[in-house]
């Protein structure tokens, strides 16, 4: 896909086309001029903009943090990148065809490129127009519920352990959380979803005791 077509789909015309080209370039295609540092910068910009969007002084820090994690998770950014055609626009080595991380990461790199090219207002407009912030777009936040429940009882925040039992082609994450001396597991193809499933099991158990 051409840079012009990519700009059209992004809804933003770059003054410095090289910034866009770099945002789309993976290390496998160019070891020096690639999108790794843009990805790093874009991750920070994205967290700030999402925080700005969802900020509510009546919400707890824990619930806001978990909501932001859901919005900026790879599992949430990947379909956005695909919808924008960024997966097809990636500049990569012909031997680099299984880098799944590249698809959500290119969105972060593009956010940074837009910021450097047009400033924070341009980046904000792009992020707010491409991400879905509506509550219905996010899974129920069982991790946030569990954390708030334990804090209300004066207990420490739950800690999660997660391991990938799958393959490079198909990840299968098993997450474990220990609450009140009992361990609860969750299994999913996405790490965060596995943790949510473990938290859901823990919450169901705790509610059954009430």
Image (cartoon, grey):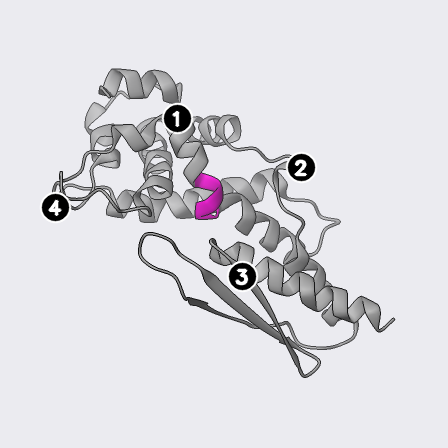
Report helix, strand or loop for mark 3. Answer: strand
Residue at 12 percent of width and 46 percent of height: 32
Residue 81: % across, % down: 39, 33
In this view, the residue in front, 19 or 92, is: 92
Q: Are marks 4 and 3 in contact (CB under 8 Å)?
A: no
* Classed neighbour count for the residue bearing mark 3: other residues with Cα under 10 Å, few (<14), some (14–19), many (≥20): many
Question: Can you tell which of label 4 and label 1 is closer to the viewer?
Answer: 1
Q: In terms of sequence position, does the residue under pointer 3 or pointer 1 come before the other?
A: 1
- Cα gap from disc 4 to disc 2, whole angstroms: 41 Å
- Residue 48 visible from this viewpoint: yes
Give whichever of discs 1 and 2 has the lower sequence position: 1
Alpha-carbon neighbours of circle 1 within 10 Å: few (<14), some, or many (≥20)?
Answer: some
Residue at the spot of label 4? 32
Tell which circle, 4 or 2, labels the residue nearer the N-terminal end. Answer: 4
Q: Which mark is residue 136?
A: 2
Please name which of the two marks, 3 or 2, marks the residue nearer to the observer. Answer: 3
Q: Secondary structure at mark 1?
A: helix
Asked whether the beta carbons under mark 4 and mark 2 sit within 8 Å of each other, the answer is no
The residue depicted at 31 percent of the width and 28 percent of the height is 117
Under circle 2, the secondary element is helix
């Amino acid at each position: 896909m051409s840079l012009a077509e990519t700009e059209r789909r992004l809804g933003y015309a770059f003054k410095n086309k090289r910034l866009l080209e770099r945002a789309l370039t993976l290390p496998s295609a160019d070891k020096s001029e690639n999108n790794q540092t843009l990805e790093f910068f874009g991750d920070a910009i994205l967290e700030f903009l999402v925080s700005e969007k969802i900020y509510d002084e009546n919400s707890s820090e824990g619930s806001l943090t978990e909501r932001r994690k859901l919005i900026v998770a790879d599992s949430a950014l990947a379909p956005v990148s695909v919808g924008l055609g960024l997966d097809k626009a990636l500049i990569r080595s012909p031997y680099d065809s299984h880098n799944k991380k590249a698809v959500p990461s290119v969105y972060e790199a593009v956010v940074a490129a837009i910021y450097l090219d047009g400033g924070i207002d341009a980046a904000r407009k792009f992020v707010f127009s491409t991400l879905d912030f509506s509550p219905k777009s996010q899974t129920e936040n069982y991790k946030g519920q569990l954390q708030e429940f334990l804090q209300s009882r004066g207990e420490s925040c739950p800690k999660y352990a997660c391991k990938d039992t799958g393959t490079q082609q198909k990840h299968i994450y098993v997450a474990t959380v220990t609450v009140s001396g009992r361990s609860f597991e969750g299994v999913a193809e996405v790490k965060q979803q596995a943790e949510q499933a473990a938290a859901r099991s823990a919450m169901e158990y705790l509610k059954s005791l009430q």
